[in-house]
Amino acid sequence: MNEYIQIVTTVATEDEAGAIARLLVEKHLAACVQVIGPMTSHYRWQGKIETAKEYLCLAKSRAALYSKIEAAIKAIHPYEVPEIIAMPVIAGSKEYLAWLGAEVKEPF
């Protein structure tokens, strides 16, 4: 079941989130990208505690495509150090995972 992952990244605007979502889906790197927000993030950056409004992107894909997804996100992400993390899908409905697998590129 660990063939599939969910990738998380955050950006400052809905337009930036939409650009990442479109890129990943158009390139068949993700079957679906959900955009959630705005939300409030609290974090430490360069020694100071910061608060910012952000949009969360949740992309569904294959684990074997992670490096291509990371590169695609980094190519258009505006942050100096973007959050790009992947979590394994440990279970899912057979029908959903079949759809997910059909929508993303086969690993090379």
Image: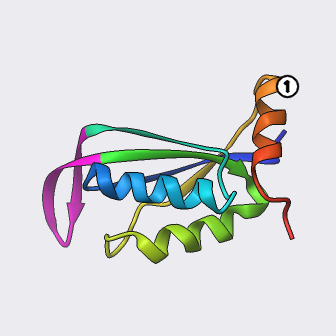
What is the three-letter code of the residue carrying label 1?
Lys
Q: Which residue is drawn at 67% across and 45% down?
A: 31
- The reply, left or right, for residue 69 in relation to residue 9 is right
Q: Which residue is drawn at 79% across and 22% down?
A: 93
* Horizontal and vertical percent position of residue 74: 47, 73
Q: Is the magenta stretch mostly helix, strand or loop?
A: strand
Magenta stretch, residue numbers: 39-54
Q: Is residue 80 visible?
A: yes
- The reply, left or right, for residue 103 in relation to residue 78 is right
Q: In this view, does 99 lie above or below 93?
A: below
Q: In the picture, which quadrant includes the N terminus?
A: top right
Q: Mark 1 points at which residue?
A: 94
Q: In the picture, which quadrant includes the C terminus?
A: bottom right
- The reply, left or right, for residue 51 in relation to residue 6 is left
* Other-residue count near label 1 (Cα within 10 Å), few / some / many at <14 / 14–19 / ≥20: few
Q: Is residue 97 above or below residue 3?
A: above
Q: In which quarter of the image is residue 65?
A: bottom right
- The reply, left or right, for residue 28 in relation to residue 25 is right
**70 in magenta:** no
Q: How is the image coloured?
A: rainbow
Q: Can residue 10 be seen in this view?
A: no
Query: 33 or 90: which is nearer to us?
Result: 33
* Horizontal and vertical percent position of residue 66: 68, 63
Q: Which residue is drawn at 39% across and 66% down?
A: 82
Q: Label 1: state its secondary structure.
A: helix
Query: 50 or 78: which is nearer to us?
Result: 78
